[in-house]
Image (cartoon, rainbow, N blue to C red):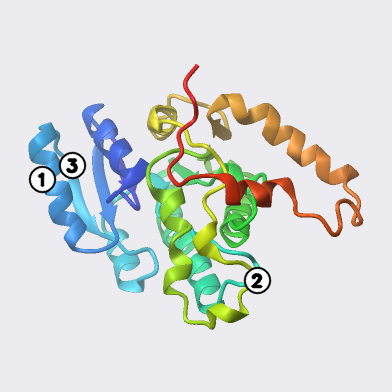
């Protein structure tokens, strides 16, 4: 079977999908950001009885990216990413730059080298793990959303540019899923190097603004997408959120700049009203 590289496989979506692809028979390389995650995955391998290869791969590290060029990657799943929570007028510049380095610049530099190898072989597949927030926005995730909007632009452009070389390109767009990723993103202001008194918002009072789903739909769809079992370019989960996502895009065309001025937006208020790690109510 083909060789699949999944970045950010130490936790979350990438971790589970790495094992599911290995179970399907793919030669899986699970890229993890730091060395301690290697041992964690080794223990998972023992527990699950599934064989995969683990490599330390920090997408922002040039040495790690160069190392990946020796792995003969035929399917690349760009899953590594982080969420820097906070208002776009509060997040320090260093944190903004790091968000884009991890979510956009590093993965794209990795992809450049691997895609050129795919072209020489005459085939390949690149899956970008974007987000629903690559299509829509929420308060206090604007910099993250900006990075995912960038991924959407890159993926769409790449699909056009690489069509003649028979390279498949797709996006995975998870909505709010309970993996810990979203809630930990709202803890990041605790580590900012700034003056808290100058912040517009008190982040100790805010939480991720959406109830969150069980991650199984993303595991299933991302596994199928990487395995070549799906032919759709954009893949949003849960599918129940697709109408809302499309409606939000249309709303921008009719929004006025004076709309709601002087009042708190309902989505901002929702961040005050939510509890961390709140699950979607089961019907």
**Label 1, label 2: how far apart the Cα atoms are:** 44 Å
> Toward which corner of the image does residue 15 lie, by quadrant?
top left
Measured from the top left, where is residue 277 in percent x and y?
43, 43
Q: Nearer the viewer, residue 10 or 4?
A: 10
**Label 2, label 3: how far apart the Cα atoms are:** 46 Å
Q: Is residue 221 above or below residue 108?
A: above
Residue at 57% over, 66% down: 202
Question: Residue 200: which disc?
Answer: 2
Q: Nearer the viewer, residue 14 or 268?
A: 268
Disc 1 is placed on an element classified as helix
Q: Nearer the viewer, mark 2 or mark 3?
A: 2
Please say if the residues under marks 1 and 3 sit with CB atoms less than 8 Å apart. Answer: no
Residue at 50% over, 73% down: 95
Measured from the top left, where is residue 66 in percent x and y?
32, 67
Measured from the top left, where is residue 80 in percent x and y?
40, 54
Measured from the top left, where is residue 196 in percent x and y?
54, 78
Check disc 1: other Cα within 10 Å, few if <14, some if 14-19, many if 20+: few
Q: Among all residues in the image, which is located at the extreme top?
A: 283
Check disc 3: other Cα within 10 Å, few if <14, some if 14-19, many if 20+: many
Residue at 45% over, 65% down: 188
Question: Residue 43: which disc?
Answer: 1
- Residue marked by disc 3: 52
Q: Nearer the viewer, mark 1 or mark 2?
A: 2
Location of the N terminus (image quadrant)? top left
């Amino acid at each position: 079977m083909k060789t699949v590289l999944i970045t950010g496989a130490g936790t979350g979506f990438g971790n589970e999908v790495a094992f599911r692809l290995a179970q399907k028979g793919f030669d899986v390389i699970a890229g993890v950001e730091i060395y301690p995650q290697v041992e964690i995955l080794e223990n998972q391998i023992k527990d699950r009885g599934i064989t995969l290869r683990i490599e330390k791969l920090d997408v922002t590290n040039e040495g790690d990216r160069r190392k990946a060029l020796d792995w003969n990657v035929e399917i690349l799943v760009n899953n590594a990413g982080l969420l820097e929570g906070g208002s776009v007028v509060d997040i320090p510049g260093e944190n903004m730059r790091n968000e884009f380095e991890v979510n956009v610049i590093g993965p794209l530099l990795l992809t450049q080298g691997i895609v050129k190898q795919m072209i020489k072989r005459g085939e390949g597949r690149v899956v970008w793990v974007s987000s629903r927030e690559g299509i829509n926005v929420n308060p206090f995730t604007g910099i993250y959303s900006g990075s995912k909007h960038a991924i959407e632009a890159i993926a769409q452009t790449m699909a056009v540019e690489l069509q003649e070389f028979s390279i498949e390109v797709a996006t995975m767009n998870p909505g709010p899923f309970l993996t810990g990723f979203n809630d930990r993103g709202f803890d990041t202001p605790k580590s900012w190097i700034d003056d808290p008194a100058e912040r517009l918002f008190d982040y100790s009072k805010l939480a991720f603004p959406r109830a969150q789903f069980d991650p199984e739909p993303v595991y299933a769809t991302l596994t199928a997408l990487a395995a070549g079992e799906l032919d759709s370019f954009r893949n949003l989960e849960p599918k129940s959120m697709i109408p809302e996502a499309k409606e939000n895009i249309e709303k921008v065309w009719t929004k006025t700049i004076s709309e709601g001025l002087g009042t708190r937006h309902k989505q901002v208020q929702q961040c005050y009203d939510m509890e961390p790690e709140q699950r979607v109510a089961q019907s």
